[in-house]
Amino acid sequence: MRAFTMLFAALVASGCASQTATTPGTQRVNIQVTENGFEPAVVSAKAGQPITLVVTRTTDRTCATEIVLKDAHLDIHRDLPLNKAVEITFKPSKTGDLTYACGMDMFKGIVRVE
């Protein structure tokens, strides 16, 4: 787990990912959709605290024109228009991995809730 935290910190420092609080207790994470899928593919969140995923699709050369996040407590489907940031806010209630994917379930990512 420590290696993951160090890798995520390096991604934030390099600008590949960012996670900053916009209001007390709210996490904000930027995710880009590229020809390679969701970048970064793994992001961190804290259980019981709201998180906002800011997802921007930067290419037409992908099937990821939609993001789907489903589990027992979530059922989120959002279109991802080209070059427009889409904000998705939710509050993960328990620890573990929440998987999100494109509408065709080909490109995937994880919100790792700690």
Image (spheres, rainbow, N blue to C red):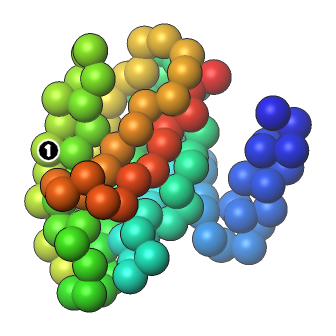
Please state the horizontal and vertical placement of residue 18, each as a whole percent of the image.
59, 59
Three-letter amino acid code at disc 1? His
User: Which residue is tagged 1?
Assistant: 77
Quarter of the image with the N terminus is top right
Q: Secondary structure at mark 1?
A: strand
* 14 lies above or below 11: below
Image coords of residue 96 (percent x, y): 54, 21
The image shows residue 21, relative to residue 92, as above or below, that is: below
Query: Image check: 16 left or right of 29?
Result: right
Say above or below: 89 vs 48. below
Residue 96 can be seen in this image: yes
Q: Going by the image, does 33 lie left or right of 6?
A: left
Quadrant of the snapshot with the C terminus = top right
In front of the other: 106 or 66: 106
- Identify which residue is drawn at 28% across, 44% down: 88
- At 18% from the left and 68% from the top, the residue drawn is 65
Instruction: Give whichever of 74, 102 is nearer the camera.
Output: 102
Q: Nearer the viewer, residue 11 or 72?
A: 72
On the image, the x and y values in percent for residue 11 come to: 71, 64
Res. 93 image quadrant: top left
63, above or below 111, in the image: below
Few, some or many C-alpha atoms within 10 Å of disc 1 (few <14, some 14-19, many ≥20)? some
- State which quadrant residue 102 falls in: bottom left
User: In the image, what residue occupies the spot 20% across and 80% down?
Assistant: 82
Judge whether residue 83 can be spotted in this image.
no
Q: Residue at x 52, y 56 (%)?
A: 41
Q: Position of residue 51 (x, y in %)?
A: 43, 35
